[in-house]
Image (cartoon, helix red, strand yellow):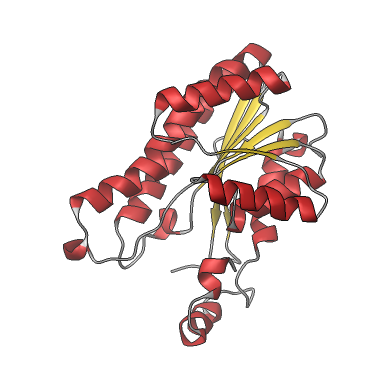
């Protein structure tokens, strides 16, 4: 579905991001993953290599525009194009507001929103030159319903939705599609560490009767990245088993 496409996946070293990398490669894209640290990038590349999957990786500071610009230019020069950008890097939060520092709130907004702006800004000119491209952002079900604590996280994801819808309108004339995927509770390594007594009540709220698997989410990204979604832009696609708060 992605043959001859070049894709960048930020936050691509674990969880949903790693599964997106794996799924895109299985569909014949050239994939470059971004991670926060050299060690995590190297580990992801090594683990994928054991599966027969070859990818390249970088670890730029996503809040350093100069560093991002250099990496994006290097990738475009090496591969000849950047067709797909998946902005997946992000951090969550669960503290009550009175326990949250201004610095913690700012850190969430910086990685979950500002970093998307920084990377997208550098990729868009190359997509405009080709008059085609796909930008996909990772949102969350809490961007629609909020959450009972950790206000910075849903706030950042509401912002991601606004960025997605606005850029979809701005870039449509250049044939660049911009969408987001809003996952529900997903069986990542982080969720796997939670106690059963916390997870089971959550599962009961999901009509499909289970939490999502990383492949469920990655398949949504695959669809939106592919030509099957050629007339879809500005959409926040919920992938949550019909979970509602």
Residue drawn at x 65%, y 61% as measured from the top left: 214
Q: Is residue 69 left or right of residue 24?
A: left
Asked if 55 appears above or below 75 in the picture, the reply is below
Q: Nearer the viewer, residue 105 or 179?
A: 105
Instruction: From the top left corner, tell me how far across and down residue 33 is, in percent.
Output: 62, 41
Instruction: From the top left corner, tell me how far across and down residue 141 is, in percent.
Output: 48, 58
Q: Is residue 202 left or right of residue 111?
A: right
Residue drawn at x 40%, y 58% as measured from the top left: 92
The count of marks equals 0
Asked if 96 appears above or below 116 in the picture, the reply is below
Q: Is residue 143 left or right of residue 108?
A: right
Residue at the extreme left of the image, as rendered: 98
Instruction: From the top left corner, tell me how far across and down residue 43 is, in percent.
Output: 63, 53
Residue at the extreme top of the image, as rendered: 129
Is residue 61 visible to the viewer in this orientation of the structure?
yes
Asked if 150 appears above or below 203 in the picture, the reply is above
Q: Nearer the viewer, residue 221 or 79?
A: 79
> Which quadrant of the rendered structure holds the C terminus?
bottom left
| Residue 208 picture quarter | bottom right
Instruction: From the top left corner, tell me how far across and down residue 48 is, in percent.
Output: 73, 52
> Which quadrant of the rendered structure holds the N terminus?
top right
| Residue 95 picture quarter | bottom left
Residue drawn at x 78%, y 55% as measured from the top left: 50
Q: Nearer the viewer, residue 184 or 236?
A: 184
Is residue 181 visible to the viewer in this orientation of the structure?
no
Asked if 181 appears above or below 94 in the picture, the reply is above
Residue drawn at x 46%, y 36% as measured from the top left: 116
């Amino acid at each position: 579905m992605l043959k001859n496409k070049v894709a960048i996946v930020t936050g691509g070293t674990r969880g949903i991001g790693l599964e997106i990398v794996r799924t895109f490669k299985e569909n014949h894209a050239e994939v470059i993953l971004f991670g926060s640290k050299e060690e995590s990038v190297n580990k992801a590349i090594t683990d994928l290599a054991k599966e027969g999957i070859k990818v390249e990786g970088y670890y730029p500071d996503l809040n350093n525009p100069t560093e991002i610009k250099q990496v994006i230019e290097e990738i475009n020069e090496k591969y000849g194009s950047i067709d797909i950008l998946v902005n997946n890097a992000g951090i969550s939060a669960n503290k009550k507001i009175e326990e949250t520092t201004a610095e913690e709130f700012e850190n969430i907004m910086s990685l979950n929103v500002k970093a998307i702006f920084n990377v997208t800004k550098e990729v868009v000119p190359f997509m405009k030159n080709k008059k085609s491209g796909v930008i996909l952002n990772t949102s969350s079900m809490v961007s629609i319903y909020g959450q009972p604590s950790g206000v910075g996280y849903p706030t950042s994801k509401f912002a991601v939705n606004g960025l997605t819808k606005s850029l979809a309108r701005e870039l449509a004339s250049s044939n660049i599609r911009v969408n987001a995927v809003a996952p529900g509770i997903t069986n990542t390594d982080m969720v796997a560490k939670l106690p059963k007594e916390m997870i089971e009540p959550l599962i009961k709220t999901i009509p499909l009767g289970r939490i999502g698997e990383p492949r469920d989410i990655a398949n949504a990204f695959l669809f939106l990245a592919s030509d099957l979604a050629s007339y879809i832009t500005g959409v926040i696609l919920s992938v949550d088993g019909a979970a509602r708060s």
